[in-house]
Amino acid sequence: MLGYLFMIFAVVSAILALVQRDLLKAVILTGVSGASVAFIFQILLAPDVALTQAIIVAAIEPAFIALTVKKTTREDV
Amino acid sequence: MIMDLQLASLLTCGFLMIIGMFAAIFIDNVIKKVIGIAFIEEGVNLFIVTIGYKAGGVVPIILPEMDPSWFASNAAYPLPFGLVLTSIVIGASTLAIMLALIMILYKKYGTLSAKELLKDRSKEAVADE
Amino acid sequence: MNELIPLMVIFPIAAALLINLFGFKSTFVKYISIIVAFIIPIIPLASNFGLHYFGGHAPLESSLSGILYHTAITYSFTAFEQLFIFILGILGFFVVLIYVNSYKKASGPYLFLLFMGIAAVSALILSDDIFHMFVFFEIAAIVQVGIVAASTIKDRYEIALKYMIVGSIGSPIILLGIAFLLAIFGNVNITDIVNMINAGFPAASSPVFFASLALIFFGWLYTAGLPPFHTAKSGIYSGAEPQGAALLQAFSVITMVSILIAMVRIFSGLEIFNVILVAFSLLAMILSITMALVQTDFKRMIAFLAVGELGFIGLGMGIGTELSMTAGLFQAVNEMVITALLFIGFGAIAVVCKTTDINKLGGLISDYPKTAIMVLIGGFAMAGVPPLNGFQSKLMLVQSALNAGYPEFAIIIVLISIATFVVFVKVFYLMFLKTKPKALEVSGEKIPKSTIITLAVFLIICITLGLFPSIATDTISGFVGGLL
């Protein structure tokens, strides 16, 4: 049951990330989507992949993007 | 249950890929393009993991008290999981390079609009002279 | 000495890392990279033919079906791979030589990219494992972007970002295709997949199999730079330094050939495969020539011609007879050498004249007679003038198209060759023969000796392959015989 919840979460936060005007919010929502997919991996019997996903996609990639946003601009015009 | 976990997961990765593809092609902001590309990769990774999933199975880690033949018929298929690990890391590295290029280009042009950054400048240079 | 097989990949990677580590010591980097570049073409010559199983995991035999299953990543090394890796090594050596000679400070990261690329494409052509191919395909793509971004051309970052965004859409798609194959066969080893198809595996005729063909084919179009990616691909050739562009073209040719061979092995049972292969190859040839005709930037022109030539390889493989496939792969070998010659030759002119606009150039034959003549012969080789190597492979292609009962393809090949000749002669006339415009100031800079030597060596390879094509075609036809 938890699996379905995370799937909906992943898709919804992905859509929300792309409609944000503030890029920093988009970055946070990207991380949320990545973390939900990590939970789905755990439920799909792949704990090792879930760990990697949680570290790289849910933490490091948003950090990279946030750094870029900080160096460039926050507004999506 | 209306639909089983594997099917729902396949639908999710389909949605993620379509959302990502849409963002990568149609959204003008390059950072959002990059986020879209990250979603495409996430969707493909989820697809590969879903291939390996076995309903009612166990995690493919053999423990000392497990019977090998029972384990072989009940464990999920671990090969796709191994492949996904590599592809996640590849995705992160391409993302990092794209972001680095974006930072350099922002310094040069002061904008994140793909139309401005990626337009064909060879013709413009001729027109200037 | 089968141990040398993995060394063809590991040695350049290790050398690349070492060079990057000592990137601050310029002279040290120069010497060590020359030595490494000299050793790389020797390894394939010294190695024995055979298979290499990583980790020593020999294939297991299934007790039920008696089919062999490869559990390890497998490298297969035959005379065919030897030919390609040797030519690549030669190109790499001369590219490194020119780079080290023409820049006072050798940059460690740039040499790192060159060696990493050589390792990646060597792994691509050696590997028998489709996911392993994908990993090195991604490394090769990143290396290509890096070589462009590290050049001194004006719009390099824009070109690099554009190619990277296109590539980031293309590579998940090829991965999805591989995932479909994995879902059907539960395996990523090409030999195993082919064995299962031959044993009458039921899912091999399912729609999912078609879908995986479509996805992998799309990814292949991106690596090869066939339409709709021909503009992005020719962009990266013109965005790189001349010697970098020469190596980039070799990378694309080998990546294209190795993925194409994997596709031919897996999907040749599907009739639609040959149809789409021929269709896209013809489209590439025609579109690239028309794009090349309207350019005013001569680097861009040569880049489009180079992309168009890739169509001949696809066409030869698509016709599907033994002779045509031999011709296509022979064209691939010739293509690497000829375009390297042209990129380096024209690139040297671009460096000394500081412009790439053909309308501002002219009369350069009096300043650079040696380069002009060698570039002219290289262009003739590309257009297919006897007795050069391009002539031999195109003649074989025409013959094979006629033998297979497709005279229309033969006509198109001849027409495209003539168009290539026209484009090339136009470029040559505008750059070298027409009276010199007053605005052009030739700085009197000499073209470096290393460039002249490189051009001469490539020309010798072209003429040798043109006079004695059996050196290459014997190995290739042996390989193609095993493929069919």
Image (cartoon, rainbow, N blue to C red):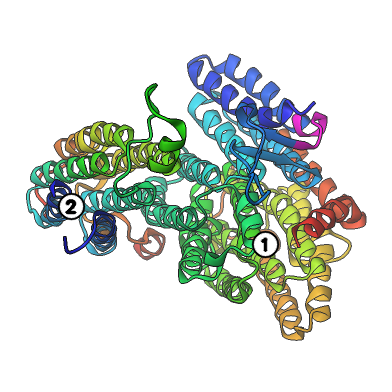
x, y percent for residue A24 = 10, 42
Q: Is residue C192 visible?
A: yes
Is mark 1 in CB contact (under 8 Å) with mark 2? no
Q: Is mark 1 on a helix, strand or loop?
A: helix
Within the image, what quadrant is residue C457 found in?
top right
In the picture, measured across the screen, residue C208 lies left or right of residue C445, that is: left
The subunit carrying tag 1 is C
- Asked whether residue C49 is drawn in magenta, I would say yes
Give the magenta range.
C43-50
The kind of residue tagged 2 is: Met
Q: In this view, does C196 lie above or below C288?
A: above
> Between C431 and C171, which is closer to the camera in this rendering?
C171
* Residue sitting nearer the eye, C205 or C387: C205
> Mark 2 sits on what residue?
A7
Residue count near mark 2 (Cα–Cα under 10 Å), binned few <14, some 14–19, many ≥20: many
Give the residue number, with chain letter if any, for mark 1.
C198
Residue B54 on the magenta segment: no
Query: Neighbour class for label 1 at 10 Å: few (<14), some, many (≥20)?
Result: few
Closer to the camera in the image, B31 or C96: B31
Q: Where is residue C135 in the image (x, y as percent from the top left)?
A: 49, 42
Tell us which disc is closer to us: 1 or 2.
Answer: 1
Q: Which chain carries label 2?
A: A
State which quarter of the image contains the N terminus of chain C: top right
